Amino acid sequence: MRGRARGGRNDAVKQSDEGAGPAAPSRRKDARRNKETLLEAAAAVFVTSGVDAPVRDVASRAGVGLGTLYRHFPTRADLIIAVYRHQVEACAEAGPALLATAATPHSALRQWIDLFVDFLVTKHGLAAVLRSDQAGFGALHDYFLDRLLPVCAELLDSAVTAGEIRADIDALTLMRGVGNLCIGAESDPDYDARRLAGVLVDGLRRPG
Amino acid sequence: MRGRARGGRNDAVKQSDEGAGPAAPSRRKDARRNKETLLEAAAAVFVTSGVDAPVRDVASRAGVGLGTLYRHFPTRADLIIAVYRHQVEACAEAGPALLATAATPHSALRQWIDLFVDFLVTKHGLAAVLRSDQAGFGALHDYFLDRLLPVCAELLDSAVTAGEIRADIDALTLMRGVGNLCIGAESDPDYDARRLAGVLVDGLRRPG
Amino acid sequence: MRGRARGGRNDAVKQSDEGAGPAAPSRRKDARRNKETLLEAAAAVFVTSGVDAPVRDVASRAGVGLGTLYRHFPTRADLIIAVYRHQVEACAEAGPALLATAATPHSALRQWIDLFVDFLVTKHGLAAVLRSDQAGFGALHDYFLDRLLPVCAELLDSAVTAGEIRADIDALTLMRGVGNLCIGAESDPDYDARRLAGVLVDGLRRPG
Amino acid sequence: MRGRARGGRNDAVKQSDEGAGPAAPSRRKDARRNKETLLEAAAAVFVTSGVDAPVRDVASRAGVGLGTLYRHFPTRADLIIAVYRHQVEACAEAGPALLATAATPHSALRQWIDLFVDFLVTKHGLAAVLRSDQAGFGALHDYFLDRLLPVCAELLDSAVTAGEIRADIDALTLMRGVGNLCIGAESDPDYDARRLAGVLVDGLRRPG
DNA sequence: TATGAATGAGTGTTCATTCAT
DNA sequence: GATGAATGAACACTCATTCAT
């Protein structure tokens, strides 16, 4: 982590113009254009250098000024959120769907965790960001939790209710655990985060 | 500012000799004293700021010059190793002991992992250092692996041989997984790394 | 400490554009201003402490931040080049001119070497930088050679062709020799680098 | 150059126990032994890393403490002097001999300069040390001058008296010029310091 | 007398963030 | 609104020199 954050500002992040509601997209065409360019650039840079890449690299790749980047994304977390919003959204939506189609709630949970792992692992360094002590990433942390925690909780609850798994692991702990398991996975082919996550979910099963 | 650090909770770091054999402890009393002071200071700083704390902080807290620190511990990894050597050693030695006393190999593994988790969780930021891509921590990484990997492997093998657990998770993957699970645990009381590690080990059990 | 350096004797460094063509001078007035200030400060510091002076001194004297200096001149060599570009340029252009006006090629060479010596001697420590084994000065070394070597070579060739001088000294050797002769000349009034260089060029004459 | 010298102390260096007179060799056998060991170590280190090598390297190679080195050679210059005293001596003695045997004084001078160049070039970095502005090398500078300058002056004078060469270059200037010509020669096979020095001496010849 | 531990100023370099233009 | 120049704290690391042991 670079973590020289000298003043986090973890605003709410619900009001973006991208997600569900069309919450006031910028009136200026060029501004909207810039935002998209930035998102593409950030995505590219994140692939190459991870989500900890210097912000300047992103601005530079997008061909816009640093100030512009900061205007659109006051925080690195805001940028990461925006870049991965769609995929997070898809992951969130997959929860209920899996619950409806899978053989059992535990199976649904397992498949959903796979999705989650895939998402994290393919995003260089993103997993590390679920760590709570990370300064300046509050917004990102909140966003992840707000969106995915309920989904995970529902899957978990269903499995508990079905008597498939133990009840003493809450969704937050599970998600953070899986998140942690994914750290460093992208850079080491010998480390199989997905399998480990599977083992972890297996471990939730009732002993009996 | 120059006062000798009285060290908040630095137990068990008094003797600085190598693991086996009294490999040439410094002949000079003051040097030995300084090394101890540094170890205490480092332990204290690590508790406060994690193992990534600036080396200067450690030197400063120990009341010695930067050069002195570098003399005794050319690398940050060397410092960390020295600080935690005893505990790592204890953890390593506990492996065979548990194997001998526990009801089953899997039980031994479970208890050993608990030990390992406790060690990592109480050391602010140390867990993160098991990540392989961390530059400049080669010595530390190697030390951990050299010392603990065989222990873990033995426990794992025993459990596999006993038919208790699946065979497709190797010791390195397991250790890295557990290590990852511990990241950030010390700063968040709601995140129960120990329990998660337990779940993970449970997940190793044969499905049947 | 923060006051704008008023620059003791820094003439002729006002325009910072590339050699040929007005290669994109910064659009921002303050940036341009800063670059000039840095050039003046660097020139002043070079006079005082030589071209090996800490970069921090230059930034400090210019009253700008370290980052600003690094932005404009990523390498110390870049800074030196910028400071002396004009004079190097003048020296380079003088070669053909002298060849056209001097009585003989050897005379032209001699006068050109005088120019070269004057340039080096007035720049504290610059001569030492022609040494090839100097790490990190590649850019500077290349610049000098790219610009002045062909000029020297032409003068040399002309004199050889005219039968005035021996042919076994190549331009690079001569330039490095003269460069070396100039080392330390600025700080010792009793050491006459110019005269020595003259003797050297005299020594090139055909024995006959 | 390293040049962090924070307190030069250019004492006289005549009184060493090595040179001509047996000026009070140390009474203690082990001390004498240490001095020799240090000389050998220094010679070896100088070949490898040049005369600017960290003093600690020399002490370490000699297997003695730093303090011992400092006791015997309070200054780096003292060490260099001691290491090369014999060869300097030989060079000094060669002057009159050459004058007696060579065809002409100029020829003697030329041969002597060859000797001098050979000495400097084979000593990694030693040539650079003749520069006058080098802090902390006063003793070395003085020694060289005291011993070799008269020799060079005599050769020069003889040639002047014989009408062979111009009279406006004094011995000091010539020696420093040759010394400078040798800088960097050992590390670049393409740079022929010896030939250049020959050209320089040739250039001293009377124009007529 | 020998040792080598300790000192700490000095240097290059990076980057998040602000704000004048 | 957009730009990107400027800031400067932060950090690791080196080594000449001193002096307690």
Image: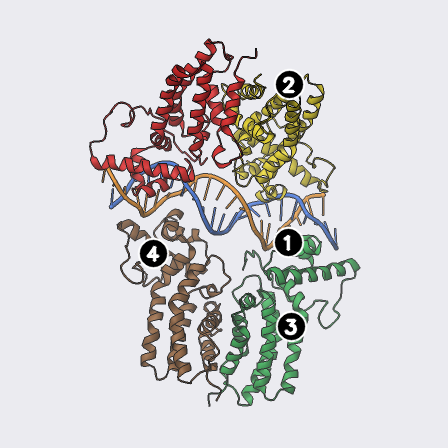
Chain colours: A red, B yellow, C brown, D green, E blue, F orange
Marks 2 and 4: CB-CB under 8 Å?
no
Residue under the image location 36 percent in, 70 percent down? C91
Alpha carbon distance from label 1 to label 4: 43 Å
Amino acid under disc 4: Arg
Q: Is the residue C14 above or below the residue A16 in the image?
A: below
Q: Secondary structure at mark 3?
A: helix
Q: Secondary structure at mark 2?
A: helix
User: On residue D88, which mark appears?
Assistant: 3
Crowd band around label 4 with a 10 angstrom C-alpha radius: few (<14), some (14–19), many (20+): few
Residue E8 coordinates in the image, percent (x, y): 55, 45
Instruction: Let me know if marks 1 and 4 both belong to one chain.
Output: no
Quarter of the picture containing the C terminus of chain A is top right
Quickly name the residue at label 1. Answer: D56
Foreground: A74 or B203?
B203
Instruction: Let me know if marks 4 and 3 both belong to one chain.
Output: no
Instruction: Let me know if marks 2 and 4 both belong to one chain.
Output: no
User: On residue C6, which mark appears?
Assistant: 4
Quickly name the residue at label 2. Answer: B107
Tell me if D58 is positioned left or right of C81 in this view. Answer: right
Badge nearest the viewer, 2 or 1: 2
Task: Write down the chain letter for disc 2.
Answer: B
Q: Secondary structure at mark 1?
A: helix
